[in-house]
Amino acid sequence: MLTMKGKYGLKALHYLSGIPEGTVAQSVEIAETYGMSKKFLDAILADLRNGGFVETRKGRSGGYRLAHRPEEIMVGHALRVLDGPLAPISCASRTAYQRCSDCADEATCAVRLSMLEVREAIASVLDTKSLADMSAMVEAARIDAEEFLEIS
Amino acid sequence: MTHHIVIAGGGASGAIMAANLFRLGDGALRVTLVEASGEIGKGLAYSTNNPSHLFNVRAAQLSAFSGTPDHFERWLAIAYPQIARNGPFVPRGIYGEYLEAALRETAPVGKFRVLSQACVGMRQLENGVEVTLADGSSLPAHFAVVATGFGMQKPNEGLLSNPWNDPLPEDKDARVLIVGTGLTMVDTVLSLLDNGHRGKIIAVSRRGLLSQRHALHRPLQLSTADIPLGASIHYLSRWLTDLVRTHVANGGDWRDVMDGMRPHIQAVWRYLPTESRQRFLRHAAAFWDIHRHRMPPAQAERIDAVLESGQLEIVKGRFVSATRCGTRLFADIVRSGWDEPQPFKADVIYDCRGVRRRADQTLPGLPGALVEAGAARLEKLGLGLEFDRNCALVNREGEPSARIFGIGPVTLGTFWESIAVPDIREQARLIAEKIASGGRVAPRNSLASLP
């Protein structure tokens, strides 16, 4: 499940993949760009730092930057650090497993068995999509939108 | 069109490769196995004749074909029924025989040959590969596979004995020093005991860690979706420790977690950032190894007994060098907490420091020649040759070859987990399928046009 945290975290990573190499971004500018609470964003960036996806520079000119090149960071990998195992429902994960309170027999639960497949599909999409791919998608969508405006 | 495939190295990896080529190919192929010893399936791991040297993988996992998981067990039940009954951990010495049988079963008459030669070079041409042999002759091939194993350096400092080839000491009371405390040390101690050794045996390694033992367990069913790929080693190791703790708290065994991780280790390693890999090698690899590569219970009991009696002692320290003084050898060992090396007296010193390449070592044999010629390059940490995800050899410019592949321990630097049969047969399947699909090469690209 994509939580608010996951959503903001990916947006922050997308922002960081767009800043020039060798520079850092402060959390306040990221928070303002996307209209999120700075306090929440700081907590999210701390988790990403802990997972080794972003680095911080301390001091007056300090801030955040990606720990690796945008081509090397997969969306699915960052998401596991933000939201835990990729799973559309909590009984479809081994490590962050939670049984549904109304479940009679999970081994033969139709929903769970389907969601186990969905989980693999999510992983296969998000684990091959890098931050660079994500930026390219944004760019392509932007061009489409501009063309649309010109036509209309 | 008949493809000709040359495999350099006839150990277990090369033999599994050949058997999979025949089984998965369309039948229109010829395979030449180039192996200096002329023996099939008996590389470093499987040339032992000592029945105490056991697999550290269960018999159920030893099939040469991932599509037929019980292939080995069926062979074992007929060839060695008494061993088959004896439990899941079988002697390594019989594996070569099994692989020969697997090849007899799969290779059509006249399509398979073994050349008792060393392979010294491979050059990729437009339409194939030119494989050079030690006698100066060359073989034309459509595809080539490097299966040269760990590529251990031959004779070392001269004073240290090689645990695989050198004879055991004749003097049963000799004082033996073993450098390394991994599974090679365990094999060496068992060989000494089988030989009636009475003298003191000291094993030294920096951390003095001994392999854990196997036990009955049920591997945890993990999916890649569960595992924090791409995260730092710090994050990953904390995640793993937490998972073990929760699992044990719920009545499970830590081995369930290790074995559940097993199928995903290559993926974890692939996405582990370089700094994290370096940290892992420096701080965690020794701990990982003793949990991942475990002793069969029968071996662990004998080791426990000699530790108890004091005949075997494990010392924490760093081996620096060895010197000879008359008939005696002296090893300089820096024990933990000491600044200066202390001399350790010994009659024989075995080098059991393991099979992982250290970055400062030269690369011998074919892999070294391939790097020299620019057909290959070392992966970032210098653990070994670089391959792409599909086992294709990566050249100096970073381009994966369409015709030269690697299988088994030679690919260890790239995949980390590529030295046990379950991983090797999976690589063999991948390469065999790739070569089979390469069968679409147009006839004009045939071998006849090779210079």
Image (spheres, helix red, strand yellow):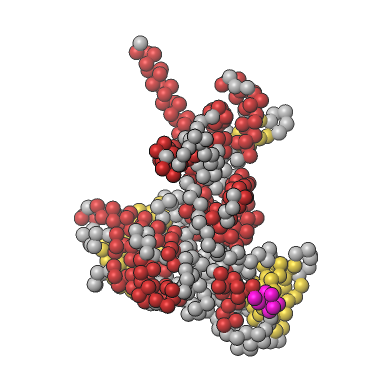
Res B120 seen here:
no
Q: Position of residue B64 (x, y in %)?
A: 38, 65
Left or right relative to B1: residue A128: right
Q: Quadrant of the N terminus of chain B?
A: bottom left
Q: Position of residue B319 (x, y in %)?
A: 68, 69
Left or right relative to B369: residue B28: left
Up-down relation of residue B221 to residue B139 (above or below): above
Residue B63 or residue B335, whichever sits in front? B63
Up-down relation of residue B415 to residue B201 (above or below): above
Q: Check if residue B311 falls in the magenta segment.
A: yes
Among the 4 quarters of the image, the one containing residue B439: bottom left
Which residue occupies the extreme bottom position in the image? B171
The residue under the point 78% across, 68% down is B340
Left or right relative to B244: residue B308: right
Q: Position of residue B163 (x, y in %)?
A: 56, 76
* Secondary structure character of the magenta stretch overall: helix
The residue under the point 37% across, 64% down is B70
The residue under the point 24% across, 72% down is B110
Q: How many marks?
A: 0
Range shown magenta: B305-312
Q: Position of residue B250 (x, y in %)?
A: 59, 49
